């Protein structure tokens, strides 16, 4: 089974139905629901999404959406080593560094985001949901 790490923007595309990205995130989550791929996130993702969803929708909708999300994804821990690596990294965005090192430490080879430009010099494949779906279809 393929493992992917999801960044907040991909999940927000789904939950907020943001065009033109929604169809790709929806298809990605269909694969997750069908157990064809396993999706991983960090606790930061839930914090970020709650903050954004409560502003876009409401607190109740944010919580309900995240409760559903929790059933679909696996949450990876962030430890001292990940924080240390992120602090010492050349990433411009500290949160992106944490996401990257969380995925890398856990042997995940695909990080799915729309924020590709912030992931320079990586040892794992960083791509959009649309790009990942093309890779997945090729097998």
Image (spheres, rainbow, N blue to C red):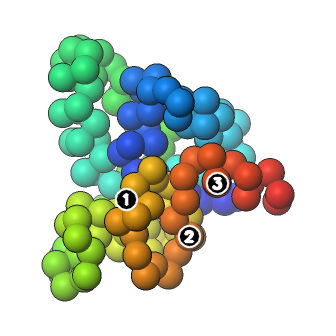
**Where's the C terminus, which quadrant?**
bottom right
- Mark 1 lies on a secondary structure that is loop
CA separation, marks 2 and 3?
9 Å
Q: Is residue 30 visible?
A: yes
Q: Is residue 113 left or right of residue 78?
A: right
* Near-viewer residue (89 or 1): 89
**Measured from the top left, where is residue 54 in percent x and y?**
20, 23
Viewer-nearest of discs 2 and 1: 2
* Near-viewer residue (84 or 76): 84
Mark positioned earlier in the residue sequence (1 or 3): 1
CA separation, marks 2 and 1?
18 Å
Numbered badge on residue 132: 3
Give the crowd class for mark 2: few <14, some 14-19, many >=20 residues within 10 Å. some
**Measured from the top left, where is residue 77 in percent x and y?**
31, 62
Which residue is denoted by mark 2 in the rendering?
125
- Looking at the image, is 108 positioned above or below residue 114? below
Which residue is denoted by mark 1 in the rendering?
76
Q: Farthest residue toward the bottom?
A: 88
**Measured from the top left, where is residue 43 in percent x and y?**
27, 50
Viewer-nearest of discs 1 and 3: 3
């Amino acid at each position: 089974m393929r493992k992917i790490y999801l960044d907040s923007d991909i999940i927000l595309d789904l939950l907020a139905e943001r065009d033109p990205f929604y169809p790709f995130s929806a298809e990605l989550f269909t694969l997750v629901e069908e157990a064809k791929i396993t999706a991983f996130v960090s606790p930061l993702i839930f914090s970020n999404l709650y903050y954004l969803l409560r502003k876009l929708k409401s607190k109740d909708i944010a919580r309900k959406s995240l409760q559903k999300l929790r059933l679909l994804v696996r949450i990876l821990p962030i430890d001292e080593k990940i924080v240390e690596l992120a602090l010492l990294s050349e990433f411009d965005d500290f949160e992106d560094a944490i996401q990257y090192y969380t995925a890398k430490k856990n042997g995940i080879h695909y990080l799915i985001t729309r924020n590709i430009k912030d992931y320079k010099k990586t040892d794992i494949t960083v791509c959009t949901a649309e790009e990942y779906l093309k890779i997945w279809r090729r097998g």
